[in-house]
Image (cartoon, rainbow, N blue to C red):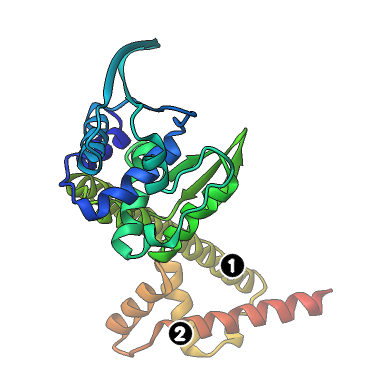
């Protein structure tokens, strides 16, 4: 079972409130694209979603609903649930503010409150939404819609809840999608899918922790590489001074530090400073050690320039 299926099943098992049933049903029928001149035909792949839509219709309208179950053989056998409504079509379409033409605009009364807007987004998600499983891919939620203005409608509703989304054209459809993990988590929470939220958050925490560990490891490796390179450069300068008999031009403190670098060629400046402070009983900091090696480098560079 896919992650999207699990979320939709959990949403579908939630309680139905008459006050939010209208916008939820409006969105589902609108984005399920099953309206004809004298009939509404809703094709649904999820049994829990089909049961919820059936209850929503019954909650709002005392009409007969024809239920058809078919087996679809595409890669694997699965059941398709078809709900057919042939009574009071004009009243239903008028109540839900749905049109079979390009006049797909909603009156403000249908989305008057935050609860109405959330119910509409929930119904749209049940009809045409999906969320990628965070354990197998990146964070991604999308609504796949026929018309660009409908995609903008979803984007505006998401924006009302401070959720940022983008629109992309894919073949002959439009996709309103979200990539931000925190926003997707907020939507799952608003939809009331608690178990799915826990699963999503567990994966997100694990991935964030893993990424943080990787960043720290990369940082540590980079620091080690930097320390090794610095040590090699320092040893190269020391060998140059010895080869050209220039060590005596340095002060005694710098000479002592050179001796300790030769004794401990692979340690960092910080570690070298601690050892020198401990063994000589003369405290020195990392910056103090580094300053001495700057003097060594400057002496090497001056000698090389003179040689040229």
Foreground pick, 70 / 233 = 70
Figure quadrant of the N terminus: top left
The image's mark for residue 77 is none
Which label sits on residue 287?
2
C-alpha span from label 2 to label 1: 22 Å
- Image coordinates of residue 88 in percent, x first then y, are 35, 35
Left or right: residue 64 compared with residue 236: left
Q: Is residue 305 visible?
A: yes
* Nearer-the-camera pick, 7 or 305: 7
Looking at the image, is 231 positioned above or below residue 119?
Answer: below
Q: Residue at x 57, y 71 (%)?
A: 238
| Picture disc at residue 239 | 1
Give the structural element (helix, strand or loop) at label 1.
helix
Residue 19 in the image: x percent, y percent?
23, 55
User: Residue, x 41% and y 81% (percent of image)?
Assistant: 286
Place of residue 229 in the rendered image (x, y in percent of width and height, measured from the top left): 54, 62
Q: Residues within 10 Å of mark 1 (few under 14, many from 20)?
A: some
* Element at label 2: helix
Can you say which quadrant of the picture contains the C terminus? bottom right
Q: Are marks 2 and 1 in contact (CB under 8 Å)?
A: no
In the displayed structure, does residue 141 sit left or right of residue 170?
Answer: left
């Amino acid at each position: 079972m896919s992650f999207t299926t699990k979320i939709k099943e959990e949403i579908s098992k939630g309680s139905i409130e008459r006050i939010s049933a209208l916008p939820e049903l409006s969105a589902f029928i609108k984005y399920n694209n099953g309206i004809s001149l004298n009939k509404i035909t809703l094709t649904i792949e999820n049994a829990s979603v089909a049961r919820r839509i059936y209850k929503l219709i019954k909650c709002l309208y005392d009409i007969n609903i024809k239920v058809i179950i078919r087996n679809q053989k595409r890669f694997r056998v699965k059941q398709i649930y078809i709900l057919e409504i042939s009574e009071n079509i004009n009243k239903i379409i008028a109540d839900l503010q749905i049109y079979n033409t390009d006049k797909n605009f909603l009156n403000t009364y249908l989305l008057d409150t935050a609860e109405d807007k959330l119910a509409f987004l929930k119904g749209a998600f049940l009809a045409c939404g999906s969320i990628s499983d965070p354990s197998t891919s990146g964070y991604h939620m999308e609504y796949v819609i026929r018309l660009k203005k409908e995609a903008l409608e979803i984007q505006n509703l998401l924006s009302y809840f401070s959720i940022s989304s983008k629109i992309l054209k894919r073949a002959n459809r439009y996709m309103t999608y979200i990539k931000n993990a925190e926003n997707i988590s907020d939507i799952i929470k608003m939809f009331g899918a608690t178990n799915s939220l826990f699963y999503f958050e567990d994966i997100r925490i694990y991935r964030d922790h893993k990424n943080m560990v990787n960043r720290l490891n990369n940082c540590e490796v980079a620091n080690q590489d930097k320390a090794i390179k610095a040590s090699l450069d320092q040893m190269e300068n020391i060998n140059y001074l010895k080869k050209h008999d220039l060590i005596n031009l340095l002060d005694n403190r710098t000479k002592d530090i050179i001796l300790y670098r030769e004794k401990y060629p692979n340690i960092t400046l910080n570690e070298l400073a601690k050892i020198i402070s401990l063994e000589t009983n003369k405290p020195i900091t990392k910056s103090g050690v580094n300053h001495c090696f700057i003097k060594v480098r400057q002496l090497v560079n001056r000698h090389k320039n003179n040689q040229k």
